[in-house]
Image (spheres, rainbow, N blue to C red):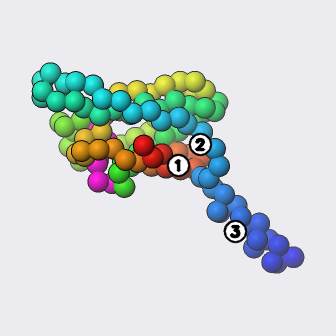
Amino acid sequence: MKKLVMLVLVLFILGCGSGEPLIQIETFEQYNPLFHSKSKFLKITSLVDSVKITDIVPNRGKCKVGGILDQGKVKINKVLKYGQVWDYIPITGCGKLLEVQVKTDKGEWNFKF
């Protein structure tokens, strides 16, 4: 019985954050005439009734979420309802966006581009 409980616990821990993501991620660039360059942005769409996004880690922490004028780490605490879109999330400090880790109240997922 003890082995069965341990097995279920291990499977639960390994399964957290895996499976189908509860959100959809898109990236896009937009020309910024003020800086004469393209800026990178994320667009997140909820695929469930409610999900709270608590952190976004682009390129394993090598880039940052926020604009050029943001100082330090930007605090994220955004709740999205089903089909709701959160767009224009600026990504700075990286040449090419390769992956984004999104942490939510229901798990975390990695998206590769």
Q: Is residue 10 above or below residue 35?
A: below
Q: Secondary structure at mark 3?
A: helix
Q: Identify the residue shown where x is 44% and y is 33%.
A: 26
User: For residue 82, which quarter of the picture?
Assistant: top right
Q: Identify the residue shown where x is 29% and y is 44%.
A: 96
**Residue under label 2:** 21
Q: Is 20 situated left or right of 44 in this image?
A: right
Q: Is 65 situated left or right of 9 in this image?
A: left
Q: Identify the residue shown where x is 59% and y is 52%.
A: 17
CA neighbours of label 3 inside 10 A, class few (<14), some (14 to 19), many (20+): few
Q: Is residue 19 above or below residue 36?
A: below
Mark positioned earlier in the residue sequence (1 or 2): 2
Give amino acid for label 1: Trp
Q: Is 68 situated left or right of 23 in this image?
A: left
Specify the segment rendered in magenta. 61-66
CA neighbours of label 1 inside 10 A, class few (<14), some (14 to 19), many (20+): some
Give amino acid for label 3: Val
Say if mark 1 contacts mark 2, CB within 8 Å: yes
**Residue under label 3:** 10
